[in-house]
Amino acid sequence: MRKAYPAGSDAADDGPRSKDVPAIRSAPQRFIETWLDAVGGFLFCVVLPIPVYATAEPFSAGIGATEQTILSTAFAYAVVWYCGRRLDAFPRVTLQGNLGYVAPVAAIAYSTIAVALLLMRSDYSRVQLFGSGVLAVLWMAFVAQLRARYLTRNYAVLPSSLTAEMPALHTCRWLDFEQVGRENVRVDAIVTDLSTDLDETQVAALTNAAIGGVPVLDRRYVMETMTGLTPLSGLTPNEFGALLPSRQYLVVRRAIELALTILTLPLLLPVLGVVALVVRSTSPGPILFVQQRVGRRGRVFRMVKFRTMHHGVDGPSFTTQSDPRVTKVGHFLRRSRLDELPQLFNVLRGDMSWVGPRPEAFALDQQYVRDIPHFALRGIVRPGVTGWAQINQGYAHKAHEMRSKLEYDIYYLKHCSLWLDLVIVLRTFAVVIGGTGAR
């Protein structure tokens, strides 16, 4: 490796670094955008409406209705903005997806504060409080669209042969490393394959760039961050430890999902009863469909669903497009995902979680384990009623589709957290409403 010289030294100016290695300059820091977003939203959602409802100069005569409203809207906006930024960190965000999780978060935050103020019998402007919630949703959706449409980041790729492998995103420009050096283009980061053997000149270039403040990112990290998939190519046993989610989080999540499932049973049981009557009255056969699926650590369990196919009809173990075995009512149940509701009993028994990789039928799972490397890693956590692969890809059964699905599942294992689970739950509602991915 070439010797790295401190900035300002004569050797740095006269040495071989300036002749052999192109100088790469870093783009301006992006953190200013975050502050503009936060401050602009605060002014738009909290400060700007004050003259509309304030009857006097705020905070001039103690804490009254106006002051309570200002403090409440400021706190609620801070919660929504923080949660929105955390959820926005995951890939595949669109305007519809952004609204799909920002709107529920805003509704919960502002409603919780309204209930707290009601219990404390504090006077405040209800119109302004909930109006601020609407403004917060509009602001965050507007900023997300601006960022997605106009914020383009430049990445220098080394070696240039990797450029063709990078994801085609309109927010990213993948530039040849040597071209960037010749044309003096500022870049946000350098993308390279750190798992390969780089020559001395390339290592020196990356070293000098890092010293100059330019981030050096591995190709696999960039692909994972921008696509939501963890590439199977290059996945080694050394990385298996990173696929183990926090045990503490899994225990807490299990307690939360049990409590929420029990609390929602009074609402879900009537729906289950109605769907059961419809299935029974529209086609002969059992109400429930029971199938052996593979769950956590390879354990086989009996998963229950509402029957959506004609009873006794033979066919493959997977559903095909426009499958003639599906009943008319079954098409609606699959599209609305109501056929999955009986799996709440699998959740209560501990066979499944609400969020996780979808369990496969036993015969198919055995085939996929043989044909697709690392497929068994999905069994690290409990399978889920919904999952990261389900909301991004939908139904799959072919080998190449299952390979892609596995890459989504491995991404979930690496990033399993409250925030990712919340994103999955909120986007699942959008998928159910749109009816996408069903067969």
Image (spheres, grey):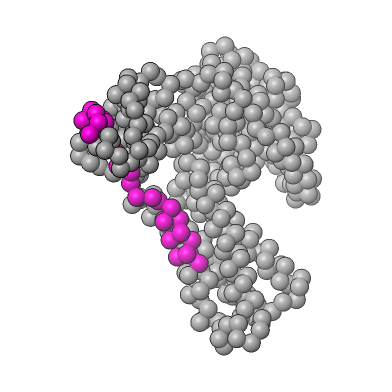
* Quarter placement of the N terminus: top left
Q: Measuring 72% from the left and 77% from the top, which residue is drawn there? A: 122
Residue in front for this viewpoint, 180 or 52: 180
Q: Does 235 lie within the magenta span?
A: no
Residue 27 part of the magenta-drawn span: yes
* Residue 55 in which image quadrant: bottom right
Q: In screen coordinates, is 244 left or right of 196? A: right
Q: Answer left or right for 266 relative to 127.
A: right
Q: Left or right of 252: which side holds 79? A: left
Q: Please tell me which residue is depicted at 54% across the width and 53% down the height of the picture.
A: 84
Extent of the magenta region? 14-42
Q: Nearer the viewer, residue 37 or 272?
A: 37
Identify which residue is drawn at 21% across, 30% down.
19
Residue 136 appears at what percent x and percent y?
52, 63
**Residue found farthest to the top:** 370
| Image vertical order of residue 286 relative to residue 260, above or below | above
Q: Position of residue 168 (x, y in %)?
A: 34, 35
The residue positioned 76% from the left and 73% from the top of the image is 120
Is residue 339 visible in this depiction of the protein?
no
76 vs 206, nearest the viewer = 206
Whether residue 301 sits left or right of residue 236 in the image: it is right
139 w.r.t. 27: above or below: below
Split into 4 quadrants, where in the image is the C terminus? top right
Asked if 396 appears above or below 214 in the picture, the reply is above
The answer to whether any part of residue 101 appears in the image is yes
Number of marks drawn: 0
* Residue 105 place in picture, x, y as percent: 60, 56
Q: Could you tell me residue 63's position as x and y percent?
A: 66, 81
